[in-house]
Image: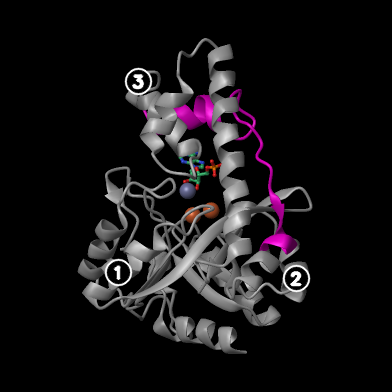
Amino acid sequence: MNPYAITADPGASRQEKPADGTADLHLHTLFSDGTFTPEELAQRGAQLGFAAMALTDHDTVEGCERMSRACQSLGIECITGTELTAEFDGHEVHLLGYFLDAHQPKLLTEIKKFQTVRQERIREMVSRLNGLGIPLRAETVFELANCHSPGRPHVARALEQEGLCVSMDQAFERYLKKGRPAWVPKYKISALDAIALIHQANGLAVMAHPGLNHCDQAIPHLASDGLDGLECFHSRHNAAQSEHYLAMARRLNLAVTGGSDCHGFSKGKPLIGGVRLSAVYLQKLKEARRS
Ligand code: AMP
Ligand code: ZN
Ligand code: FE
Ligand code: FE
């Protein structure tokens, strides 16, 4: 049992309450760096008893229509989302957009730019790997990724597939982690611009996994500039972090969200099901949308 899941219910004591939450609002498919199709993800959500799921692929909303159709056929509510990589004060932060208008022209124009940056970055990472004597081809990565939003996990998988690393973990450790020789910094939109972009596409802006970004000082600033919510529950937040961000969300009047950040199988098991957000929080998120 994942202990973080249990905290995802407002007012519930962690020890007493079972994980009865009904939503997972942070999910990836093969439209970015996940490995499930939208249909496979929806099917898994149904098996796990989820009532609502949000697709939040990196820098794209392309999978959302298929996800919506698959969810609809299974009686699951689907929220159209994305995850944007942004920057505040030199720190990388990830912003989730929810309830987006997936056809909004400015949103589509901007995410197209982010995708171009991602594609160029893959070429640069491969070129650095080549400089280290690693014979990987960019085309191999693009063929494997087969999407408009390729990222480091695709490079890691390609290295593994080509027998150039024994595992994705090794690929990140040796080459792709920040500061490693094939790591390439990515151009990032400012967090304020990302929030504005999400808003003008009729969405709500939520800071993803704040516990991973070590940028708490950004949160009050962003809250006063339109941030709508904080992802308090995440697979990589421990219970203390969830409590910390719940208190911060309460203090700053931010909506509370949560999700597994499932990218497919991770060490033999998908993360989906490990974080279950209570319907009460989802309801509050929807109220934030109306106000
Ligand atoms: P990118 O957007 O290209 O910088 O890639 C970020 C993605 O890489 C994250 O969403 C994670 O899915 C994955 N990732 C980041 N660090 C690691 C790591 N150390 N091991 C495996 N996957 C990682
Ligand atoms: Zn990812
Ligand atoms: Fe993220
Ligand atoms: Fe994510």
Mark 3 residue type: Glu
Q: Quadrant of the C terminus?
A: bottom right
Dot placed on the residue nearer the N-terminal end, 1 or 2: 1
Callout 2 crowding tier (Cα within 10 Å): few <14, some 14–19, many ≥20:
some
Residue ID for mark 1: 69
What residue is at 47 percent from the left and 86 percent from the top? 283
Secondary structure at badge 1 equals helix
Q: Is residue 24 above or below residue 171?
A: below
What residue is at 53 percent from the left and 71 percent from the top? 100
Q: Position of residue 159 (x, y in %)?
A: 41, 24
Residue in the foreground of this view, choosing between 27 and 127: 127
Q: Tell me: is circle 1 under 8 Å from ligand 4.
A: no
Mark 2 residue type: Pro
Dot placed on the residue nearer the N-terminal end, 3 or 2: 3
Residue ID for mark 3: 162
Residue ID for mark 2: 220
Residue in the foreground of this view, choosing between 5 and 23: 23
